[in-house]
Image (cartoon, helix red, strand yellow):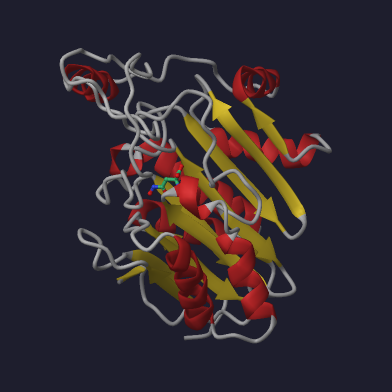
Amino acid sequence: AAALPVVINTWAFRTAAETAWRVLESGGSELDAVERGCGQCEIDQCDGSVGYGGSPDERNCMEKIFFGAVAGLRRVKNAIGVARKVIEYTKHTLLVGESASLFAVRMGFPYEDLTTQKSLSLYSEWLNQSCQPNYWKNVVPDSSKSCGPYKRPEKVTYKEEQTSSQRSVHNHDTIGMVVIGVNGTVASGTSTNGAVHKIPGRVGDSPIAGAGSYADSTAGGAAATGDGDVMMRFLPSYQAVEYMRMGTDPTVACQKVISRIKKYAPKFFGAIICANTTGSYGAACNKIPGLTQFHFIVSSPLLSRPTEQA
Ligand code: SD4
């Protein structure tokens, strides 16, 4: 379908889609729509894992060649709002960690505890499952010992790197959104808590330009979700936009991006959405057990209300 404007977002995050659409209807810019749409997910804690009360976080926000992102932001809820301030008030692209939080505070965002009952119980459940290697590589935990979180066991034996994703496919913790305005202006953004039980310091794909999302008003926009540790090596959002620039149909562009990653990581968990400046859109995912269908939401004048597709 091609009619403008178009709002497309990852997963069945309906309130985000509706918020972004309302922003456009009331005369807001494409970037406003992305910021408020993704921001709605931060408020709603979409799927229990975007926004506060999840594991540490990362996000981004971009328009044309403007890009602003924060990663490893702590104790600030509205990360995509902070990313927007990076665009508006700085010449930088990416701020990280406690210093990013400090920047947020200087911009007037509240600095607060983001822990919730849910995040506490997620954490204590995980603590009780002894010796989970999680994101460590080449480590087989010694089952006779309790490893505790983030501790590389003293006694290690080596094994092949896991090719399958360690992430649960039910762990949809990223909203990615692409907005194409009536005049073809493109904006995109993401917000996520990243990977659950990650090694502190980990930054995923979401706040990285061209990985988590990409937007270019001369071609289109794209946003990715899934195993960022694998996906960010391929800059999938940039690749999808470049395919569309060459005239590739958005669905085919998404499929090509996914199959390229698949060549190197056959079992990776991930999906991508994209839309071009005429309003045509597409999506693709890697079909793995547990993710046979990837849901996303499209809003356009051709659809009476935000429509979930798979
Ligand atoms: C990450 N890409 O930090 C994110 C996670 C995600 O659905 O998209 N989950 O790796």
Horizontal and vertical percent for residue 94?
70, 37
Horizontal and vertical percent for residue 197?
35, 28
Horizontal and vertical percent for residue 231?
50, 54
Q: Residue furthest right?
A: 91
Q: Is residue 257 above or below residue 2?
A: above
Question: Which residue: 31% across, 58% down?
Answer: 12
Is residue 87 at all visible to an observer of this figure? yes
Is 172 situated left or right of 32 in this image? left
Q: State which quadrant residue 296 falls in.
A: bottom left
Is 136 situated left or right of 86 in this image? left
Q: How many marks?
A: 0
Question: Which residue: 40% across, 35% down?
Answer: 137
| Quadrant holding the C terminus | bottom left
Q: Is residue 276 above or below residue 227?
A: below
Q: State which quadrant residue 183 falls in.
A: bottom right
Is 134 situated left or right of 91 in this image? left
Question: Which residue: 44% across, 54% down?
Answer: 225
Q: Is residue 66 above or below residue 243?
A: above
Q: Nearer the viewer, residue 5 or 287?
A: 287
Horizontal and vertical percent for residue 210?
64, 56
Is residue 188 at all visible to an observer of this figure? no
Q: Nearer the viewer, residue 286 or 64?
A: 286
Question: Which residue: 34% across, 29% down?
Answer: 139
